[in-house]
Image (tube, rainbow, N blue to C red):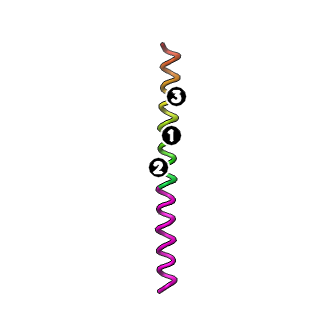
Amino acid sequence: MKSHTVVEESVEISIVDALKLISGTVMALASFLLLFAYVIRQFLV
């Protein structure tokens, strides 16, 4: 039973880490796209 709970805890931790990694990647992509759009706008105008 103890090993089972340890496995569950490690799975929950890995899921949290995955969510943090995904959210961080999404934020980085969004900021990069905003910067890219800003640069394109500057060149067009």
Identify which residue is drawn at 50% across, 58% down.
Answer: 18
Reading the chain from its start, which is encountered first: label 2 or label 3?
Answer: 2
Instruction: Classify 27 as above or below 10.
Output: above
Q: Residues within 10 Å of mark 3 (few under 14, many from 20)?
A: few
Q: Can you tell which mark lies on residue 23?
A: 2
Q: Secondary structure at mark 1?
A: helix
User: Mark 2 falls on what kind of element?
Assistant: helix
The residue labelled by disc 1 is: 29
Viewer-proximal residue among 29 and 13:
13
CA gap between label 2 and label 3 equals: 20 Å
Q: Residue 17: x and y, percent?
A: 51, 59
Look at mark 3 in the image and give the residue it sits on: 36
Q: Residue furthest bottom?
A: 1
State the separation of the CA atoms marked 2 and 1. Answer: 10 Å
Question: Amino acid under label 2?
Answer: Ser
Q: Which mark is residue 40?
A: none
- Magenta-span inclusion, residue 5: yes
Within the magenta stretch, is there residue 21? no
Write the start and end of the magenta stretch as one range.
Answer: 1-19
Decide which of tag 2 and tag 1 comes sooner along the chain: 2
